[in-house]
Image (tube, helix red, strand yellow):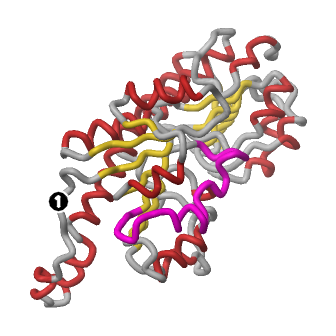
Amino acid sequence: MKFVLTHTLDDAAMQYLKDNDVTVWIADSADVPSYVDELKDADALIIRSGECRADVMDQCPKLKVVAHNGIGYDNMDVAHATELGIACAIAKGSNAQAVAEHTLAMILAFAKDLKNADEGFHNGNWAVRDAGRSFELGGKKVGIIGVGGIGRILARLCEALGMQTLGFQTGDYPAAQKKEEVESAGCIYYDDMEKLLADSDFVSVHVPLNPSTRGLIGKEELACMKKTAYLINNSRGGIVDEQALADALNADLIAGAAADVFTTEPVTEDQPLLAAKNFIGTPHSAALAKEAKARMMMMTAQNCVTICTGGITPNVVDMSVYEHRRPV
């Protein structure tokens, strides 16, 4: 078997591929179309960063799986891949703990006013301690949009601090199932996202980026939030309208916001949130805890070997591909 990797995996995952007789070609580049010739005889493509679109897939007759070394799948044309019999795999659940903890860290940073306190401390402003901006989290409400693997862990962490957890599910499936998912995570179920926005002291977004979630939080949704509330987006950049969020922050329509993900990455100088008031940003690093990285890489390698040897893994975005996948 031949696997093409946009970037190398860690030692354990690379050893796993070697043990399974995989020949590896490493591009060290996110520009997948630039090495399509290497992909033409490859069985698998593993993406750390970059995209695999329809025009590339059409030139790769042996390709059986495109795997993202992560949990998102907006960098793969899933519908076209499935039509061709190519499985799109993700490292489902591998970084859930890391992202949930990162989200909680952002919540705590706002509650304890850490950004302003640290800046004041380093600038010799001891009086910043009397600003009166910090508060306790006990009794506060956190609205979780997307109560999946990450959202469920976040709910548990927040409940341990005495917070109330509210949940809303996106997606086109029965309300009864959504309610069961939310309540099984210990959250109060909301079938109206705007009502959740209005009731929450913190709103945290944990949904995949797809046509139905792109622009999910915009000007109108932000207007539903309390002026004392905070928005956190550690899912995908396109889910929140960044200009609308920057405008809301600068107009004091909400108290603050944090994000680990952005529409354009790395961010450019025209990113409106760079200059926005009360904003905390991190460079898409929430999932990069050492333990999570190791799980992601090994799971990605295992997904590809399983699929390329005729096996079935549940970590495929569209399971219908198994009905007509390419032969081993």
User: Which secondary structure lies at badge 1?
Assistant: loop
How packed is label 1: few (under 14 Cα within 10 Å), some, or many (20 or more)?
Answer: few
Q: Is residue 212 visible?
A: yes
Q: Position of residue 106 (x, y in %)?
A: 32, 59
In terms of depth relative to the viewer, which is nearer, 142 or 21?
A: 142
In terms of depth relative to the viewer, which is nearer, 321 or 279?
A: 279
Q: Amino acid at mark 1?
A: Glu
Instruction: Name the side, left or right, on which 208 lies relative to 99.
Output: right
Q: Position of residue 99 (x, y in %)?
A: 39, 45
Residue 123 sits in quarter: bottom left
Instruction: Name the side, left or right, on which 101 lies relative to 172.
Output: left
Q: Residue at x 64, y 44 (%)?
A: 6
- Residue 205 highlighted magenta (yes or no): no
Q: Residue at x 69, y 45 (%)?
A: 212
Q: Residue at x 80, y 49 (%)?
A: 33
Instruction: Name the side, left or right, on which 165 lies relative to 267.
Output: left
Dominant secondary structure, magenta: loop
Where does the magenta region start and end? Answer: 208-230
Instruction: Name the side, left or right, on which 303 lies relative to 227.
Output: right
- Residue 229 highlighted magenta (yes or no): yes
Q: Position of residue 82 (x, y in %)?
A: 79, 26
Residue pointed to by mark 1: 136
Q: Position of residue 182 (x, y in %)?
A: 44, 31
- The quadrant of the picture occupied by the N terminus is top right
Residue 133 sits in quarter: bottom left
Q: Residue at x 42, y 39 (%)?
A: 151
